[in-house]
Image (cartoon, helix red, strand yellow):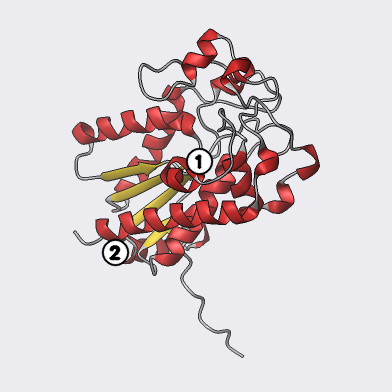
């Protein structure tokens, strides 16, 4: 018996070269998930940022009806602020930018003109901005966009119970992981990290002040465990709400993009 024809996948890694050639026209947007390989406290895995970025990319591509494909992931990011914690790997900003640019040059060479990076790691943001600026002069026919994750759902996070200090490996990030990959969350090890500004020294308090000027400090100065907030407050339902908000807003952006 002849097997039924295979459905065209929405991941480039699962396509043949023939399918990839056709995808340039059928799927004009390439989504690149980017993450980090860094500590996320005692309860979350080192690949937390990539896991979340890949999950969002899958959901966005699934809602776009074949108009977007998922390209290769970028698993290691810019994480020098976490290097005091075991297991963390970090790329320099120059290396990360070069890696992203090589991906973009290759996709451009094969005909794609719209690329979206979904980054689960905030440490990649500044480098992605400089990539975007350089492309305006060096590859002006490539439309490049990037987005973070949790900050895109800030209104949802604001409704969650959080401490005065929260963020990395805290309530929102743990909630997302409880929704997306609960088997990788060590719930018995979740414990509060830094939850109040009074726990921080002067420079660390300045680093947590919203807006500008901006100061960068190492995470071992912000929290002995690498955790900001109390992840014990997190729940899978909150994570589902955060992920749904992110996916909906990114999907809306790409749908508008595709109208041109």
Q: Residue at x 39, y 69 (%)?
A: 65
Residue 229 in view: yes
User: Which secondary structure lies at badge 2?
Assistant: helix
Q: Residue at x 70, y 52 (%)?
A: 182
Q: Position of residue 83 (x, y in %)?
A: 62, 20
Going by the picture, which residue comes out furthest to the right? 188
Q: Position of residue 241 (x, y in %)?
A: 52, 55
Left or right: 90 in relation to 181: left
Q: Position of residue 246 (x, y in %)?
A: 44, 52
Q: Is residue 36 above or below residue 30?
A: above
Q: How many marks?
A: 2
Q: Residue at x 60, y 19 (%)?
A: 222
Please give the residue where the numbered disc 2 appears in the rendered image: 25
Q: Position of residue 168 (x, y in %)?
A: 58, 32
Label pair 2/1, CB-CB below 8 angstroms: no
Label 2, label 1: how far apart the Cα atoms are:
28 Å
User: Which secondary structure lies at badge 1?
Assistant: loop
Q: Quick one: quadrant of the N terminus? A: bottom right
Q: Nearer the viewer, mark 2 or mark 1?
A: 1
- Res 221 → quadrant: top right
- Res 230 → quadrant: top right
Q: Quick one: quadrant of the C terminus? A: bottom left
Q: Residue at x 58, y 52 (%)?
A: 238
Which residue occupies the foreground of this view, 258 or 69?
258
Please give the residue where the numbered disc 1 appears in the rendered image: 120
Q: Is residue 253 above or below residue 229?
A: below
Which residue occupies the foreground of this view, 11 or 181?
181
The disc, 2 or 1, on the residue closer to the chain's N-terminal end is 2
- Res 29 → quadrant: bottom left
Left or right: 126 in relation to 191: left
Q: Is residue 50 above or below residue 168?
A: below
Residue 73 in view: no
């Amino acid at each position: 018996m002849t097997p039924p024809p295979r459905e065209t996948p929405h991941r480039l890694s699962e396509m043949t070269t023939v399918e990839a050639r056709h995808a340039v026209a059928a799927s004009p947007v390439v989504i690149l998930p980017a993450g980090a390989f860094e500590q996320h406290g005692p309860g979350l895995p080192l690949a937390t940022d990539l896991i979340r970025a890949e999950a969002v990319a899958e959901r966005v591509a699934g809602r776009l009806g074949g108009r977007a494909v998922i390209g290769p992931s970028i698993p290691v990011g810019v994480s020098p602020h976490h290097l005091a914690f075991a297991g963390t790997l970090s790329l320099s900003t120059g290396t990360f930018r070069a890696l992203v640019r090589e991906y973009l040059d290759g996709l451009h060479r094969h005909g794609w003109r719209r690329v979206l990076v979904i980054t689960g790691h905030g440490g990649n943001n500044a480098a992605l901005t400089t990539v975007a600026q350089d492309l305006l002069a060096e590859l002006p026919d490539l439309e490049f966009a990037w987005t973070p994750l949790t900050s895109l759902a800030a209104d949802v996070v604001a409704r969650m119970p959080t401490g005065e200090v929260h963020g990395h490996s805290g309530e929102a990030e743990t909630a997302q992981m409880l929704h997306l990959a609960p088997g990788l969350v060590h719930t018995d090890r979740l414990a509060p990290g830094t939850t109040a500004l009074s726990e921080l020294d002067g420079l660390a308090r300045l680093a947590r002040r919203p807006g500008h000027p901006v100061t960068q400090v190492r995470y071992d100065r912000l929290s002995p465990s690498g955790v900001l907030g109390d992840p014990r407050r997190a729940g899978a339902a909150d994570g589902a709400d955060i992920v749904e908000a992110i996916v909906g807003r990114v999907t809306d952006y790409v749908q508008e993009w595709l109208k041109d």
